[in-house]
Image: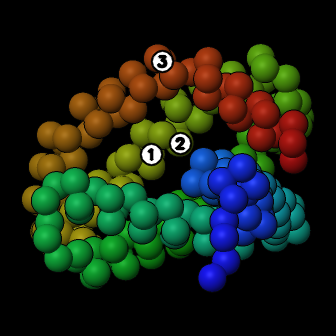
Amino acid sequence: MAIIDPACPSTENETSPTNRELVTLNSILFAVAWKRKKAIMGSLAKKGLNKYLSQLNQHPLRTKVITSGVLVALSDVTSQKLTGIQKLQLKRILLKVLYGCLYLGPFSHYLHQILDKIFHGKRDTKTVAKKVALEQLTASPWNHFVFLVYYGLIIEGRTWVQVKAKVKKEFPSLQLTAWMGIIFERPSKIRDVEEILVEN
């Protein structure tokens, strides 16, 4: 039978970590793993953004068409969930994606080409502000009108008479809300647009 001298700790005690050491070691490993995970996620996001910008530069129309379709789909899914719709209305989503791909994407692409020609490709803050103002006075009302007509006729299946009445009733408040948003968010929007233009 082995005799254990309390004054002389065993080799097992010397090599085995205490609970505190294990907790500290686990904390360090977790922190390192979390930092690495964040770095990988950040790297993936950066690579994804760079790839998207590269596609936008090489194939602007195609990229804008796909982007519009995806954003419209995400927007409608969110809208349906927020309004309490239990089962997603896939037909509505697909019809909105069609609208985004066939109208919004191409319209946005060619509109900005026209604006660039009007303002001779200038990208300073003053020019960006003028572009935003011109877009809000022309394209914004037109886009809202087209959407209300499309939504009424195609998505809701209303008659032209019903759609006309709905547009007459809802268009003014819809456009006013859009303009109010631009008025209060204009400085940040102009800065965002300017940064995107400078990057591209």
Query: Which residue is depicted at the point 87% across and 47% down?
Result: 200
Q: Relative to the observer, which residue lies in front, 47 or 89?
A: 47
| Quadrant in the picture for the N terminus | bottom right
Return the residue at label 1.
142
Q: Is residue 23 left or right of residue 83?
A: right
Q: Is residue 145 above or below residue 122?
A: below
Return the residue at label 3.
183
Return the residue at label 2.
139
Of the numbered discs 1 and 3, the one sitting upstream in the chain is 1
Query: Which residue is depicted at the point 66% across and 65% down?
Result: 4
Count of numbered tags? 3
Q: Relative to the observer, which residue lies in front, 133 or 7?
A: 7
Residue 172 at x, y = what percent? Answer: 26, 32
Whether residue 62 is visible here, answered yes or no, is yes
Residue 43 at x, y = what percent? Answer: 80, 59
What amino acid type is highlighted by mark number 3?
A: Ile
Query: Which residue is depicted at the point 77% across and 17% down?
Result: 126
Of the numbered discs 2 and 3, the one sitting upstream in the chain is 2
Q: Is residue 127 above or below residue 105?
A: above
Q: Find numbered disc 1 in the image and state the secondary structure of the residue it sits on.
A: helix
Q: Is residue 102 left or right of residue 74?
A: right
Whether residue 34 is visible here, answered yes or no, is no
Report the Cα–Cα distance between label 2 and label 3.
16 Å
